[in-house]
Image (cartoon, rainbow, N blue to C red):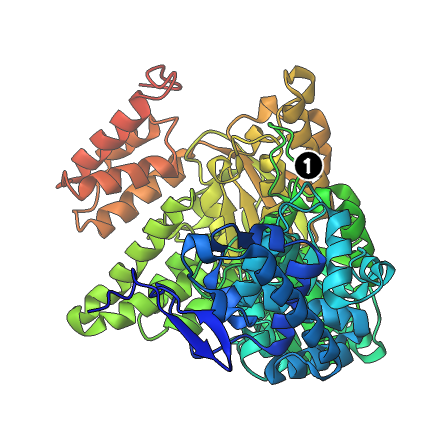
Amino acid sequence: RIVANIWKVVFVQHGEPIMARRYSRYTRHSTAPDPIVLLWILRILVCLGGHREFLRPHGFNCDRIADVIGLGAWIDPSPEDFNMKAALSEMRSLHLKAERQQAKVLPGACLRHNVGQLSRLVGLNATDCRILEFAVSIHNERLLDDAADWLGQLSSTKVFHALSVILNLPESDIRASLNAQGILVRSGLVSMDRSGTSTLRGKLDMLSGEFSDLMASAEADPIDLLRGTVTAAPPAQLDLADYGHIRPSLDILHPYLSHATATRRAGVNIFLHGAPGTGKTQLVRALASKLGCELFEVASEDNDGDPVNGERRLRAFRAAQSFFTRRQALITFDEVEDVFNDGDSFYGRKSTAQVRKAWINRMLEENPVPTLWLSNAIHGLDPAFIRRFDMVFELPVPPKKQRERILQETCGDLLDAASISRIAEAETLAPAVVTKAGSVIRAIREALDPQACAPAFERLISNTLVAQGHRTITRNDPTRLPDIYDPRFIHADIDLGNVATGLLGTRSGRLCLYGPPGTGKTAYGRWLAGKLDMPLSIKRASDLISKWVGDTEKNIARAFHEAEQDGALLLIDEVDSFLQDRRTAQHGWEVSEVNEMLTQMESFPGIFIASTNLMDGLDQASLRRFDLKVKFDFLRSEQAWELVRRYCKQLQLPSPQPELLDRTMRLRQLTPGDFAAVIRRHRFHPITSPDLLLSALEAECAIKEGGKATIGFL
């Protein structure tokens, strides 16, 4: 019995003795690389000296490569029978034979087809095409990669030389094609890492791994070759009518993009920023639909769901610009933070855009396909980049009127009118949050009681808002007036009815309502909005003050802007927080807040009401900005008595006896707010008689500063 991996037997074939090899662990595969790949391997081994690593004293470094290039007969001899010189001689003969056939040796059909397509689309020259073919092959053919590894770690200069030999092209042409200004590199298809040394494969970086696979495996449409890096956008779910709150910006943006696509204007770039979920992506899709353009989006993650870094996203963007130059198209680059804000100033690490600053600047001036850059925030963006965008504008959270419309259209089957109005008060509520909550409730709708849909929806919205760092939805309607309200029960130094009549005609004015707490200042603003049939926007100090320097000013500006868009009456309560006397300010931001408030007041075209309990502390300059200053004071005796009578009726109590009038007249610090407090207490501590009602009002007055000091007679 012959043990194949031990015994050696000599045979005679064609009259020449050959050595019968030991049983080899190497298994021959049925498929071999394309002939062009074999030629490249032979050039690496013979012309570039790769044979020094390939050939060993006792055999080959890689039996698979030996087999495919024609040295299969030399595989796995006994150590003492392997002849390096003879194997090298035969390899050189195989190389010469392959060189004589080089004119007939071509890449695979799929690769030739796809490279040809890209050549016509992007404008590649012959050298670009040969380099691209080789780069695709070395990323797909393991044997070619293995052979190239035997060249060791290469500098950029050595890469130029190696490619010149492997592709049989002048080194000057190779350098020109791999130059940063060359079409091959500018298109993002292939780039060369010029930093340090690396293997040949490592030096030739492809657009993506999937791009390499597709180039070699199937005849594909150019957009398919970009799979995983650039995708065709899905249809828009909204239209431009849903963005009425940014109509002034759209009135510029839409015709500008229309002109740019029609005239092939270069260097068109729009920077759109706004909080997450405000609809930036949907806006771009709606614009593309309106313009009749294709829309392509630079992916932020690959097909496996893994994030794509900023450098590679820029490569994909460059490829998209080259691919779609001749198409009626727009490109979207979302989450630009990956490129512009991925540095770390603390550690001195520059962002991708700063590292590629010259290229970014040139690209923003020369890109042939109009591009919309989307970001959640603009802070941290280098001003040198900002000034190169044609338009920069914010997509804010829609104003209340628009929020109500979105809630009605997307969730009207889940919510009643009161719920819609209440939820719409959340000024940080983004459309995407509404859509997501609606989809969740619809998924479990059958498991919920019909009356539970709206509360469940509100709970989802509130939880999301809190998680985002915003305030939750308030359960009380801030625009609701007390059940008993009449401006005749307001003790003001001017006829409030006449004020309403005057504003009904002008629809413009700045009012300052001042006086003790509870005297009805905010309630009058609510009543006035209803009288004028205007939406009401109420902002308290806590709604506007931020812990971040500069954000309070932004919140003030946003409040005025939103009220203007909604055509709403704007009421800012506790305005003394923003209009304190600048002469007593201790910090620069205190002055800045006053200045911002004054600026917004002067430019606001609608009706603005400011209320304060601390008139004496207001900045003197602010007082001149108010068209009317109205003092709200404690109730007069006759007003207080009439309110006692009305509340007794509301609480279904007996009519108050005349002897209670004297007690009422002694309450010189009584306000409508005291009645509201007593009525709230009645819900859990019932009031059963007019006498108890007066006692409760007396208690409210007694706890006020100076409340025990009597005025008038006892």
Q: Position of residue 456 (x, y in %)?
A: 25, 60
Q: Could you tell me which secondary element the residue under label 1 belongs to?
A: helix
Relative depth, front residue between 383 and 61: 61
> What residue do we see at 80% from left, 55% from top?
180
Locate the C terminus by quadrant. Answer: top left
291 lies above or below 196: below
- Is 86 left, or right, of 431 in this rendering? right
Residue 309 visible in this rendered orientation of the protein:
no
Locate the N terminus by quadrant. Answer: bottom left
261 lies above or below 202: below
- Is 79 left, or right, of 651 in this rendering? right
Q: Position of residue 343 (x, y in %)?
A: 62, 38
Relative depth, front residue between 498 and 259: 259
The number of numbered discs placed on residues in the rendered structure image is 1
- Is 560 left, or right, of 712 in this rendering? right
Q: Position of residue 186 (x, y in %)?
A: 76, 61
Q: Based on the displayed image, in which of its 4 quarters is residue 585 positioned?
A: top right
Residue at the extreme front of the image, as rendered: 15
Residue 130 visible in this rendered orientation of the protein:
yes
Amino acid type assigned to the residue bearing label 1 in the image: Glu
Relative depth, front residue between 697 and 627: 627
Q: Position of residue 41 (x, y in %)?
A: 62, 65
> What residue do we see at 72% from left, 59% from top?
47
> What residue do we see at 29% from left, 48% from top?
646
> What residue do we see at 44% from left, 77% from top?
12
Relative depth, front residue between 418 and 120: 120
Q: Would you name the residue on which mark 1 appears?
A: 596
Dot 1 surroundings within 10 Å: few (below 14), some, or many (20 or more)? some
Q: Based on the displayed image, in which of its 4 quarters is residue 253 positioned?
A: bottom right
Q: Based on the displayed image, in which of its 4 quarters is residue 265 positioned?
A: bottom right
